[in-house]
């Protein structure tokens, strides 16, 4: 954890010292009224595009891979981290993209989760509805996790994100954290088993399982 903290601080330092990319306002804004501006940074945009197309390669739309366009954006809502605008156009928050580009060990899983979720929205044809529903958010999560698993990525990351949100009490009608967490756990049983095995190992090392009969049945609440 100490090393991750050091890496995060280094990433923040690099971001603060990096040259500020130029912003392009009007030409692509029409795709989404929630966007303040499009950010021109070819290195980061190429990096995001590479990661996005890696995900697209394991979808049923892999033949349309080159039709997808990935843009860096500043959103009116600072909490937004991505958006699927339809017509195979995906926007990613510039801060999230820059973090992943500069500090991949810490922030790349977050970028990949954004991309998988937004690509899933596009594949499921959600942008046509303009206003997403909780059901659509859950559908996008579901497909996003499936794509992660096809790529061999550790889907426990999704579980960890929702567990963190739940502990902080972050939820809404559109983003029901409890349902998102429950779905992620059901789609990633191997992650839950790994967690169970790790906890069992810790308890064995502390000799608690031997001292507390029946404890093993309650290691991971169902």
Image (tube, grey):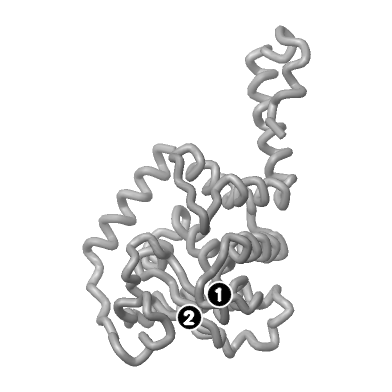
Does residue 205 appear to the left or right of 104 in the view shown?
right
Image x and y of residue 49, in percent: 50, 78
Mark 1 lies on a secondary structure that is: helix
Tell me the number on the disc at residue 155.
none
Q: Which residue is mark 2?
A: 70
Q: Crowding at label 1, few (<14), some or many (≥20) Cα neighbours within 10 Å?
A: many
Q: Quarter of the image holding residue 68?
A: bottom right
Image x and y of residue 220, in percent: 69, 31
Q: Quarter of the image holding residue 126?
A: bottom right
Can you say which quadrant of the picture contains the N terminus? top left
Residue at 63%, 79% in the rendered image: 125
Contact? badges 1 and 2 (CB < 8 Å): yes
Q: Earlier in the sequence, mark 1 or mark 2?
A: 1
**51 and 74: which is toward the camera:** 74
Q: CA distance from mark 1 to mark 2?
A: 8 Å
Is 165 located above or below residue 117 in the figure? above
Image x and y of residue 20, in percent: 23, 73
Tell me the number on the disc at residue 52.
1
Number of numbered discs: 2
Q: Is residue 151 visible?
A: no
């Amino acid at each position: 954890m100490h090393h991750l903290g050091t890496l995060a601080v280094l990433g923040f330092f690099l971001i603060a010292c990096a040259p500020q990319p130029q912003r392009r306002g009007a030409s692509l804004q029409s795709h989404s009224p929630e966007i303040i501006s499009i950010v021109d940074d070819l290195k980061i945009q190429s990096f995001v595009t590479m990661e996005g197309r890696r995900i697209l390669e394991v979808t049923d739309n892999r033949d349309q891979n080159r039709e997808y366009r990935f843009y860096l954006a500043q959103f009116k809502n600072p909490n937004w981290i991505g958006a699927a605008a339809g017509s195979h156009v995906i926007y990613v928050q510039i801060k999230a993209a820059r973090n992943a580009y500069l500090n991949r060990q810490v922030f790349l899983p977050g970028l990949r989760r954004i991309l998988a979720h937004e690509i899933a929205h596009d594949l499921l044809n959600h942008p046509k509805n303009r206003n997403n529903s909780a059901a659509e958010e859950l559908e996008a999560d579901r497909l996003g996790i499936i794509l992660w698993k096809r790529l061999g990525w550790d889907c426990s990351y999704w579980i960890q994100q929702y567990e963190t949100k739940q502990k902080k009490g972050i939820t809404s009608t559109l983003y029901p954290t409890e349902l998102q967490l429950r779905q992620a756990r059901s789609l990633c049983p191997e992650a839950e088993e790994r967690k169970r095995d790790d906890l069992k190992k810790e308890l064995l090392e502390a000799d608690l399982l031997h001292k507390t009969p029946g404890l093993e049945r309650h290691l991971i609440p169902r």
